[in-house]
Amino acid sequence: MSLPQNVTLAASLPFPAAALVTLILATFYFWYYKGSSTYLAAFVSIGIVVVSSLLVILIPIDVYLLSSTKEDSGLRKSWATNETIHHVETTVFYGYNGLYAAMLMFMFLLVPFTYFSHPPQDAKHPKKINVARGFQFSSVSFVFLCLLLIAGGVVQNGDTPSHNSTIYSQINYVSMEGCFPTAMEHGMYFVVNCLGIIGAICCIVYTAYGMAILPINLIKGKPIDKVQRQHMDLSIEEITEKLKQLTDLKAHERPLSEPERRQVEQYSQQLLKFQMESDSMRHRSYALIGQCDGPFRCIQAFFGVILYLLSLLIVIVIVISNSNRLLSSTGMYSGYILDQATITNPVDILLQLCHEAYPLDYILLGGILCYIIISTLSGMQHMGMWLFWLKLHHLRPRRSTSRALVFSAFVLAVVTIYSGVLAYSLAPQYVTYGTQKYLVHDHVTERDDSELCSTNASTDKCIMTVTMQQQTKMFYRIWVFGVAYYWCSWLFVLAFITGTVIAVCRMRKTVAQLLMRDYMELTGSEERLV
C-alpha cells in the first residue's frame, strides 16, 4: 500500500522550501563577508553550507514519516504496512547517503582545490587562480579520503548487540535488507563521523564563545558617545604626531627611506579614515537616529536577553540530556544511547508538541540550527580562524578574502554535521522515535496502555529514524565516536561558561580601537599606532 497523499505532500513540500531558505541565507552570508572573492569561492562556500544544512533539515522529515505511521493510541495506521514503511525508510536512507556523498565531494575535492588555488592575502594578484597548485592539494586530499574509506570499512573496536535483542532489529531495519553495501556504508559513515569530531571541536572553540559573546554584547551595547569621542580625538592626535615626526625629517632635507615613505602613506590614509569617522560620529549625534538612540538601545538589550536565554536553554538541555544518558543508557560501548529519560527535557517535549502541528517542529529545529550557525560566525569574527596555534584568517564584513570565506564555510559545514549529532543531545526522544507510541499490557489492570517508544520495544512496535539507525550502528561498531561526542558536549557546556565570564569582563571596543584593529589586520603590522 502506498503513502496517503496528505502524508506525501506534508513530507515533500517543506523540504524544497527549507532548501531555498537555506540557499538564500548562505548567499547572504557570502555577500555580507566577501571582499575580493571569485565565483569559484562563492560556489564552494555557498554549496558546502547548503549541503551540510540539508542533512539536518532532513531529520524532521525522517521523524514525520515514522511518526505518521502510528495513531495516538499506539496502533499502526491501516496503510502503514511493513512494505510501505520499509520503502519510505529506504528512500530517506538514500537521501542521507546522497547528501553524505555530496558533502565528501565538497570537503575532500572542491574545498582543498579552491582554498589552495587562491593566492594568500598579500599577493599582488588576489584573484589569480593557480589551477595546478589546486589540483595537487585536491589529489592528496582525495588519496586521504580513499584511505579513510578503507579504514572505516575495516576498523572495528566494538561488538554489535545480540542478534536477538530489540535494539539490533531496530538499528538494522533498513540495512539488513541489503539496500546498501555494508563496507561502503561503514566507510562513508566513518569519514562523516571524523568530520563530525572536527565539528565538535570547532563548536567548542567558536560556537560556545559565540553563543556567549553575541547576546552579551547586545546587552552591554557600545561605549557611550563621550568615551567614543575621547578615544577618537586621542587617536587622531597620536597619528598626527607620528606623521609630523616623519615629515619633519623630510623638512630637514634628509631623504626618507622606502619604509618611511610607506609609513607616511599609511599614516595619511589612517588619519583620513579617523577624521571621516570622527565627523560622521558628530553628525550622527545631531541626526534623528542619534536622538532615538535610547529606544534602540532598549530593543537591542531586549534581543540580547532573549538570545542569552536561548543560549542558556540549549546549554541546560544538554546538561539534562547528558545526565539522563549517564544515569540510564545502554552504556559507553554503544555511545551512551538513551534507554529511558529520568529527568524531563523541555526541548524534547516542545519538539514533540510542535510535531503535532507539523511543520512547527521543522521551523523550531531550523531556528536552533540557524542560531548555532550565527553563533559560530560570531565566534569566528571575534576570535579569528585558527589551525592549532596558528591564526590563519580574519572574518570581517565586506573584507574577507577568498581563502577566509572557504575556510569559514568549511568550519560552518563541520559544525552543522555535528549539529545533527547535537540534535540527539537536545531532543533524544524526538530524534530517535518522534512521537511514536506502542501498546504495553499492564498485568495489574489487565489493560493495554500506550507508552513512548524506547529501545525495549520490538521492531513491529517501534522503529528508529534512519539518522539514529546510522548513528547507533556506527557507535556500536566504533564506540570511540559515541564517547567522543558525549564528552565533547560536556566540554561545550564548560566552554560556554568560560565564554560568558570572558564576555562579561571584556570591555567593548570603541570605534577608534576597531579602526586600529582593522589597520593592523590589513597591513599585517605588529606596531600599534595608538
Image (cartoon, grey):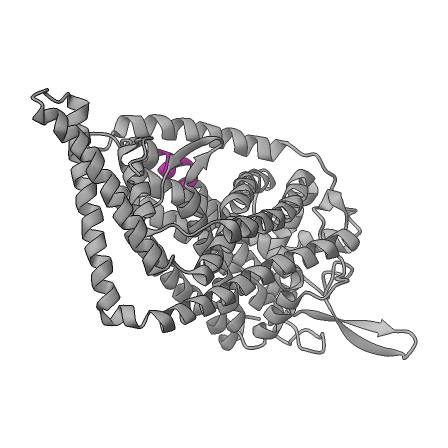
Residue at x-position 62% and y-position 56%: 424
Q: Quadrant of the C terminus?
A: top left
Residues 268 and 116: in front is 268
Displayed quadrant of residue 190: top right
- Residue 439, compared with residue 382, is above or below; it is below
- Residue 35, compared with residue 11, is above or below; it is above
Q: Quadrant of the N terminus?
A: bottom right
Residue at x-position 45% and y-position 60%: 220
Q: Is residue 497 left or right of residue 54?
A: right
Q: Residue furthest right?
A: 444
Question: In the rendering, at what x and y percent does residue 195 appear?
Answer: 52, 41
Q: Is residue 85 left or right of residue 96?
A: right
Q: Which residues are magenta?
A: 105-112
Check residue 111 for magenta coloring.
yes
Dominant SS of magenta comes to: helix
Question: In the rendering, at what x and y percent does residue 506 appear?
Answer: 48, 49
Residues 196 and 143: in front is 196
Visible residue check, residue 39: no
Question: In the rendering, at what x and y percent does residue 338 appear?
Answer: 72, 55
Visible residue check, residue 222: yes
- Residue 91, compared with residue 401, is above or below; it is below
